[in-house]
Amino acid sequence: MAERKHIHLSGICGTAMASLAGLLREKGCRVTGSDAAAYPPMSDLLREMGVPVAQPYAEANLDAKPGQPGPDLVVIGNALSRGNPEVERLLDSQSTVKRIPFTSMAAVLHEEFLAGRETLVVAGTHGKTTTTSMLAWIYQTASHENPALEPSFLIGGVAENFGTSYQLRPTHTFLLEGDEYDTAFFDKGPKFLHYFPDGLILTSVEFDHADIYADLEAVKLAFKRLVNLIPRAGVIVAYDGSSNVTECVSHALCRVERYGFTEGADWRIENLRHEDGKSLWEVHHAGALWAELEMLVAGEHNVLNATAAAALAANHGVPVAAIKAALASFRSVKRRLEVRAVIDGVTIIDDFAHHPTAIRETLRALRQVYPAANGTTGRLWAVLEPRSNTLRRNVFQRELVDSLALADRVILDAVYQQQRIPEGERLHPEQVIAALNAQGTPAELCADVAAIVDSLNRQLQPGDVVAILSNGGFDGIYEKLPACLAQRSALIPGALART
């Protein structure tokens, strides 16, 4: 990429795009970007990298500046579509002398970073970010004894062990989160079809991304196409508790190893328990105890994620001692069960919830971590912004009710940009609230974040745990709620409600 001095990323604040910005800088490119809005953690990461982010989108963002030529290449994020001023400027330029080349994030990754490397991809409807972070930390830990194992990686979130979402090294292995979402407005196939993995973890296959997939069959077809890219010498590590996963790997031409709880699993989890804030379990492989593992991250789903990462790493020669040490010191991912504040005995959790299954597993994990939040000594609150393209639709409305019912109290925000969803497909939050109240879970619908913060401020009591669930910025609630509680506590110490 020596001839491309200036790369501009349109949609740079997406998790993968911000990570790509870091990789491009590591390779010596000058990187700029633009977006409609920036919010943590990626806005923080870009600021630390010194990457300028123009807001909002504008044709002028692609112009040359005094002493700075315009971009040699523009990478278009998949959130951008026709009508976006930067997209229109690029298309208009294609028939002019000053043509501006453009491409997608996935294409740049394949062309500039994956060629000639061993590529290991983590895919699935759920658990991709955490599992990729676990795999990267396993390789990083193993590199202390064998420097050749130090990985390059791109993760769709900030891995707390690294403090970043990307790393570029001259070594052979590149670890990558494989996203099933579409690639760009001009490439509607999933991103992961650009990566051509040598090894694959498949965590789960469910209907998701209702804006681009018509139904579950369409989702399964995408994953079957990914499986079809694995070379004969490769390996797939696939969850054994899903018939959808089984179907997707059934015609693989490479070795397939299953992980999970069933008797026939190649990597079988046994004796799972949660003690003193730790998850502890055994992994049996080839009919014998392979390892006793532990980590500080809670939840059965995370034990599955860790077992998958361990199995793929072991298949590629990583010693079991390094795997054990890595998982024991693994520190999770930003916005995955992340504690944002503890004020007067109230714990505020940030979790990147995007699907009813993810909400269910988050609430189940919080019950394990905070057993005192049992409805008596404390309460588990679920505060949800229906923001993802799946949650904004009614396709999983019944499942959403069932997942939220695992909390003791529920607050639902208005549906994010509801007007963009066809009327017949829209989630009906008032029906979700009515169903929860009818089955005994107190729930309320609030018009905005100000109303949510006010309601919580009046009701929270010591011992409560508040899970804030959103895959976006949620209008700053992660800062506004702690600030409100802290202000009240400063004025009247211990003043949180006890009703």
Image (cartoon, rainbow, N blue to C red):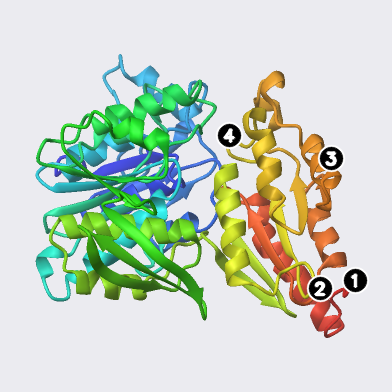
The kind of secondary structure element at disc 1 is loop
The quadrant in which the N terminus is found is top left
Q: Position of residue 358 (x, y in %)?
A: 55, 48
Foreground tag (3 vs 2): 3
Q: Which amino acid does label 2 sit on?
A: Gln
Q: Which mark is residue 390?
A: 4
* Camera-nearest residue between 183 and 257: 257
Q: Give whichever of discs 2 and 1 has the lower sequence position.
A: 2
The kind of secondary structure element at disc 3 is helix
Q: How many labels does the image show?
A: 4
Structural distance between the alpha carbons of marks 3 and 2: 24 Å
Q: Give whichever of discs 3 and 1 has the lower sequence position.
A: 3
Would residue 239 be found to the left or right of residue 469 on screen? left
The kind of secondary structure element at disc 2 is loop
Q: Give whichever of discs 3 and 4 has the lower sequence position.
A: 4
Q: Which residue has dot 1 on it?
A: 499
Q: Which residue has dot 3 on it?
A: 434
Q: In which quarter of the image is residue 165?
A: bottom left
The kind of secondary structure element at disc 4 is loop
Label 3, residues with CA under 10 Å away: few <14, some 14-19, many ≥20 = some
> Pointer 3 and pointer 4: residues touching (CB < 8 Å)?
no
Would residue 144 be found to the left or right of residue 250 on screen? left
Q: Which amino acid does label 3 sit on?
A: Ala
